[in-house]
Image (tube, helix red, strand yellow):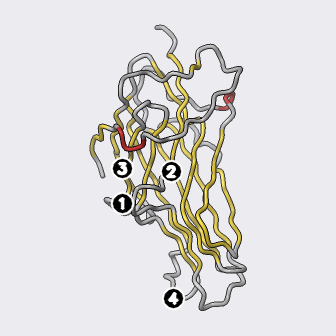
Amino acid sequence: MAGGLLLSGAVAALVTTALPAHNPSDVFDNPPPDKIVIDVATVNGSGCPAGTAAVAVSPDNTAFTVTYSEYLAQAGGGSDPTAFRRNCQLNLVVHVPQGFTYAVASADYRGFAALQRGATGTQKASYYFQGSSTTVPRSHPFTGPYNDDWQATDDTDWAQLVWAPCGVLRNFNINTELRVNAGSTSADKVSFMTMDSTDGDISTVYHLAWKECPSS
């Protein structure tokens, strides 16, 4: 997975997050026109074995996506005792045009869950820039019986946005986790939760906010 990825038209149909009416004056709707390049520095975790996670940037620079192909947690039946929890840690180098900085304004997580009656599932995520504090992890619970696609969205108030430092290149780290608890389900029943896709239609989408860096 390591190496540079020039990211272009894989996600042209992304829906961008609307901007509030009273943004700070240096925050603007229009992202810089030059393409963003993302280098995937490292990928670690039981939910994203080597070669199973991919990153792409929308053509208009308003978002980037992470797509997984083997991100699945399960419990019950003959499941491996460690399979109830799966996680992924992505370390990304995000190259942005000079004079600009970005923040993650919102994130959309998607997948599929098949939870038996009495079982529960949880999706959890956090992110941070190298050298900065980790954002408070956000969790989204799901309760069985459940057998459908799922979606969870994390929105951040503009005043609470965490901006990439200007003038220095800091890696961007994303931590995600899925957990499934069999609970009171019959011991022979399997419950599972995925954050993966075999056809590229299900991705985690990180919507970006932009602003200009102060003049030096």
Q: CA distance from mark 4 to mark 1?
A: 24 Å
Say if mark 1 contacts mark 2, CB within 8 Å. Answer: no
SS of the residue under disc 1: loop
Q: CA distance from mark 2 to mark 4?
A: 29 Å
Which residue carries the number 4 mark? Answer: 78
Which residue carries the number 1 mark? Answer: 52
Residue 35 location (% of width, % of height): 35, 28
SS of the residue under disc 3: strand
For the residue marked with disc 3, what is the amino acid?
A: Thr
Q: Earlier in the sequence, mark 2 or mark 3?
A: 3
Say if mark 2 contacts mark 3, CB within 8 Å. Answer: no
Which residue carries the number 2 mark? Answer: 204
Q: CA distance from mark 1 to mark 3?
A: 13 Å
Label 1 neighbour load within 10 Å: few <14, some 14-19, many 20+: some
Label 3 neighbour load within 10 Å: few <14, some 14-19, many 20+: some
Q: Is residue 191 above or below residue 53?
A: below
